[in-house]
Image: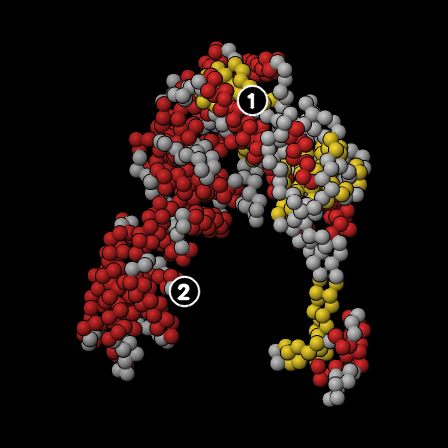
Amino acid sequence: MTSSISTPNSSNPNDLVLEIGVEEIPSRFISPMLETLKATAVKDLGELRIPFTDVVVYATPRRLVLFVHGLGERQEDLVAVYKGPPWATAFDSLGNATRAAEGFAKNKGIAIDDLKEVDMDGVHYAVAEVREEGKLTASLLPVFLPGLIGKLVFPKNMYWRDPAVRFARPIRWIVALNGGEVVPFVYGGVKSGRISCGHRFMGNKNIEIKNTDELLEKLYDNYVILDQEKRKQKLLAGIASLEHEHNGIVELDPEVVEENLYLVEYPVPFIGSFDEGFLQIPQEVLTTSMKKNQKYFAVRTKEGKLMNFFVGVSNNRAVDMKIIREGNERVLRARLEDAAFFWTEDRKHSLGENVERLKNVVYQEKLGSVYDKVMETQKLALWLCEELKMPELAKLVERAAFLSKADLVTHMVYEFPELQGIMGREYARIDGEDPRVALALYEQYLPKSASDSVPSDNVGAILGLAERIHIIVNCHKVGLEPTGSQDPYGLRRAARCINEILWARKLDVDVREAVRTCALTNRVDMRTVDKIFSFLEQRLLVQIKEKDYEHELAKLAISVAGHRPLQALRLVEALNKVKDEPWFDGLVTAAVRVRNILQKAEKVSDSIDPALTLKAEEKSLYDEIVKMEPFVAATLQTSDWTKLTESLSELSPIVTGFFDNVMVMDPDKKTRANRLAILKRCNALFEEIGNLGTLKS
């Protein structure tokens, strides 16, 4: 085989390569391990003070490879600076060294003449600079490389000879070259050298690597595409060719692409077919069976309809690819026959008949059965319908909630848990359930991830909200709230989904009231309820900030409307539009000034005498406050944040004018008390719309 790839730039003879040859590593281990290998190598080289220009890592299922380019010939020197006695103590007036200087110099292993006088905070000290000359890099590599291998920890490790040596799979060979020289060491009973191994079926078993320049090229000549990016390009190019030949579109699921990438060393895509009769089964069943069990790609028409073809990736370019194709077709046929059997068996019972069986399925040992969870979620979902003033959805929501987990006890979901919700939707359709109910059984789980779509219908949205609120409340009830990085019941994800659904569907729900309602039904104490409020508020803050709103602006909006996430987002949007306006900055400054004055005042009366408003500016402020108080209250009730900011823009120059022209601390006691009372009422108005002072850094 003729090489057609470029090799790394290895003009430096001190380039280093480490190849760890193993039995096949599970594909899911490899991508994270590449990051670990590179990060660990960079860290260890830094700690050893070995200079380098670049670190590159490669992997296939049978090898992990590290390239270090531009490796320095020796360590950088280590210079340590030590502070000794004061210079006046170390040397007398004639410049002669005292015992203090002699002892310090001896302790640091340097001559007295090498001590330096250094000024530190006005005091002159005797300082010793101790230089440790860097060692030759070649002398450090035999310790560095096995140490590096020992730090590679996989999700599951095994041992084969020495129980103290563990790796993802047994190590069979190690190539370790510094330029053209072998770096000698033994790891796991395997001695390092220059002998690598080609492709298991198509390459030579023993390949001599003379120097670091040769590794990629010689492996390529032996059907190992070491560079995963080049391997991916070949994989996708082969699939594109098959698409053209069969006039279809291959469904390139990113997870399946990566899995195949690390299952082969030389990808050979092929296309196979299955009986068209299997297309009567829901397409998600077919595609899931292909992906999960066989790592195949589904094929669709250009219009998106599933075809009775699949694309697999072989690690062997056989003389007759027909044999490989037929073997894979037989395996897939058996899988699809199982799926067809499950489909037939499940249809013998309606979803409604399955609900009773949920009593025997434990949701969580402290929280009862899945049936209990379904019934409680149903009650909360109906409460949400009332809260949202959507009585027309009540019957649909009630039925959807009742059937929401019925597919958990089907054969299909037992075999393919990822089809939960999908099968509920399909079986509901067959049972003749209302289409919106069937859709809700699927959409109750949306969004499944940060980039996933949200429910397209409010029936599924309400059901999804009810279940997530129920989960958050009840997990907190039994002490299963998230701690640090641990969140086994996905409560952070549940909180995120609640906000995403409310925002996307524009559902104005008082989440605190929903939590209280759920807590009352489930007998949750108020202390725990307060913890839940705090948890939800913190998650809301994180999500709003993720939309690139300033921290303090987000906090202000949440302090006003955090119990209603939809309104919290709308308020921060309204505030963000005006935050750079001069009037808004002036209003924030005034709010801070009002608060500071009141904090310094000993006692401020609530009583205001309009007759004592001597100056036009204080009368204007008083009149504006009186006018705005009912307006602000109404605006907070209706959540008309645009009108609120418009009113604040009118208030801002009046408050500013007051401070520019009115002396609050007037010598006259009554006038002073009256002005402080006006400011107290002004501050109360500000507090209604949040602590504006927090926006002033």
**Mark 2 neighbour class, 10 Å CA radius: few under 14, some 14 to 19, many 20 or more:** few
The answer to which of 378 and 557 lies nearer the viewer is 557
Residue 553 visible in the picture: yes
Secondary structure under the numbered disc 2 in the rendered image: loop
Task: Pinpoint residue 86: horizontal percent, then vertical percent.
Answer: 70, 80
Label of residue 269 in the image: 1
Task: Pinpoint residue 45: horizontal percent, then vertical percent.
Answer: 68, 51
Above or below 514: residue 196: above
Q: Distance between the residues labelled 1 and 2?
A: 60 Å
- The reply to whether the C-beta atoms of the residues labelled 1 and 2 are less than 8 Å apart is no
Residue that numbered label 2 is attached to: 697
Residue at left offset 63%, top offset 15%: 319
The answer to which of 481 and 167 lies nearer the viewer is 167
Above or below 31: residue 570: below
Tell me which amino acid carries mark 1.
Answer: Pro
Secondary structure under the numbered disc 1 in the rendered image: strand
**Mark 1 neighbour class, 10 Å CA radius: few under 14, some 14 to 19, many 20 or more:** many
Label of residue 360 in the image: none
Residue at left offset 39%, top offset 21%: 303
Which quarter of the figure has residue 513? top left
Tell me which amino acid carries mark 2.
Answer: Ser
Q: Quadrant of the N terminus?
A: top right
Task: Pinpoint residue 147: horizontal percent, then vertical percent.
Answer: 74, 46
Locate residue 110 relative to residue 338 in the image: left or right.
right
Residue at left offset 75%, top offset 37%: 194
Above or below 140: residue 626: below
Locate residue 655 relative to residue 429 in the image: left or right.
left
Mark 1 or mark 2: which comes first in sequence? 1
Residue 428 visible in the picture: no
Task: Pinpoint residue 116: horizontal percent, then vertical percent.
Answer: 70, 76
Q: Quadrant of the C terminus?
A: bottom left
